[in-house]
Image (cartoon, rainbow, N blue to C red):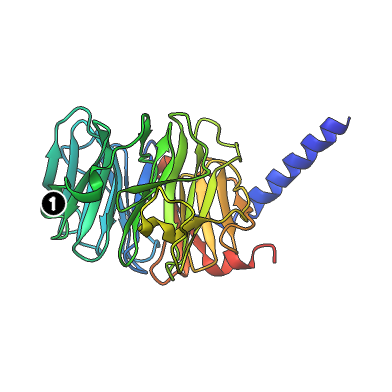
């Protein structure tokens, strides 16, 4: 009898959560999975995914235009970067790995990079500024594959030197789950790995983090840095166990002075230390983002969660599954994308006011 009561309570909570879902679905496309999203302005939204699909809005999500890139109808564009409503770059992950760019809002696409190596798998793209960007790919011969551009993606060169010669450990790789496992700050490049080994990387130097790992389906999926650049958050989990809550969220705080207790690491990485006073997020999360210096939104197949204190406490706001979340530049809203070509919208005001 007690078990029945518990089940009924959980069902009621689920129904209540679904009824109060603050995320508004703006568009859908049956059979399409969206994992790439870029929001360059308050009005412009771009997203990309399976079946050669690209979608854009130029009016803040009031309407969307769907397109299928000619000649690439079977490809999966899991990574995207948009400068505005006209200039956009998309990345097809593998077989062969391809980067395309448009200057006219998707009417025409130019191939700016191609690699037919069967071991190639491109995971994400990020830009440090208007011109300088990086595409990251799964390790080849135990070395991280990196491409760099200095002309807005018109040309790409493989990065061979410096710290980037660092070797990964066996079974350590990247997840192309949300185009959000690489970020920049004012001086460094950060990314996270998963699989048999999950680590936080800074300019080619790695640090162990308390993230679930030792499985090809587990590890860190997403990384975000706060606007003041003093905090980094990392989300992941095991996508084969979407409701597992152990070791699926990590927060790092920037140090003013080097922490010399970990002598095996370079001094530059001493400036980040794991914050142990955070709580578990509700299940597997493939993407997360800082909306401001305190408010964090995370999404995955387990639903959508928010934290108003950088991960110290989490609140589930929706059971709806999404792959990726991105914020508006003015930080007044967040957009989500996932399976079924769904793109959702959440205002910051509504998320802050939830369950006050």
Quadrant in the rendering for residue 111? top left
**Picture quarter with the C terminus:** bottom right
Residue 189, compared with residue 301, is above or below; it is below
Residue 324 in view here? no
Label 1 Cα neighbours within 10 Å, binned few <14 / some 14-19 / many ≥20: few
Q: Residue at x 13, y 39 (%)?
A: 114
Q: Residue at x 56, y 45 (%)?
A: 303
Residue in the foreground of this view, choosing between 299 and 271: 271
Residue in the foreground of this view, choosing between 97 and 344: 97
Q: Which residue is mark 1?
A: 108
Is residue 4 toward the left or the right of residue 276 in the image? right
Is residue 213 toward the left or the right of residue 17 in the image? left
Residue in the foreground of this view, choosing between 138 and 240: 138
Is residue 8 toward the left or the right of residue 260 in the image? right
Image x and y of residue 143, in percent: 25, 37
Secondary structure under tag 1 reads: loop
Q: Residue at x 61, y 45 (%)?
A: 282
Image x and y of residue 336, in percent: 45, 53
Residue in the foreground of this view, choosing between 102 and 271: 271
Image x and y of residue 45, in percent: 34, 60
Image x and y of residue 21, in percent: 60, 54
Residue found at the far right of this picture? 1
Quadrant in the rendering for residue 153? bottom left
**Picture quarter with the N terminus:** top right
> How many numbered circles are shown?
1
Residue 153 in view here? yes
Q: Residue at x 19, y 47 (%)?
A: 147
């Amino acid at each position: 009898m007690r078990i029945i009561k518990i089940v009924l309570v959980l069902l009621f909570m689920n129904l209540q959560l679904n009824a109060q879902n603050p995320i508004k679905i703006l568009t859908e496309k049956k059979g399409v999975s969206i994992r790439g999203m870029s929001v360059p302005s308050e009005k412009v939204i771009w997203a990309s995914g399976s079946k050669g699909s690209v979608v854009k809005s130029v009016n803040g999500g009031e309407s969307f235009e769907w397109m299928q890139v000619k000649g690439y109808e079977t490809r999966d564009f899991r990574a995207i970067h948009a400068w505005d409503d006209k200039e956009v770059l998309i990345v097809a992950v593998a077989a062969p790995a391809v980067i395309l760019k448009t200057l006219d809002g998707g009417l025409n696409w130019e191939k700016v990079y191609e690699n037919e190596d069967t071991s190639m798998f491109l995971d994400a793209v990020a830009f440090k500024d208007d011109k300088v960007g990086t595409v990251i790919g799964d390790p080849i011969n135990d070395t991280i594959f990196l491409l760099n551009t200095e002309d807005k993606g018109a040309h790409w060169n493989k990065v061979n030197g410096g710290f980037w010669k660092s070797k990964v450990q066996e079974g350590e790789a990247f997840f192309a789950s949300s185009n959000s496992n690489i970020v920049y700050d004012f001086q460094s490049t950060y990314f996270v790995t998963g699989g048999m080994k999950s680590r936080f990387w800074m300019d080619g130097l790695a640090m162990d983090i308390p993230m679930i790992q030792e499985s090809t389906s587990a590890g860190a999926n997403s990384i975000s840095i706060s606007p003041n650049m003093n905090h980094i958050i990392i989300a992941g989990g095991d996508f084969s166990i979407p409701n597992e809550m152990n070791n699926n969220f990590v927060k790092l705080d920037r140090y003013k002075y080097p922490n010399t207790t970990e002598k095996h690491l370079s001094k530059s990485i001493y400036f980040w230390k794991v914050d142990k006073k955070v709580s578990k997020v509700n299940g597997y999360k493939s993407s997360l983002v800082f909306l401001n210096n305190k408010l964090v939104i995370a999404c995955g197949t387990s639903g959508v969660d928010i934290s108003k204190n950088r991960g110290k406490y989490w609140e589930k706001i929706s059971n709806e599954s999404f792959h990726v979340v991105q914020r508006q530049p003015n930080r007044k809203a967040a957009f989500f994308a996932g399976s079924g070509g769904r793109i959702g919208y959440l205002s910051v005001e509504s998320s802050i006011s939830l369950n006050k």
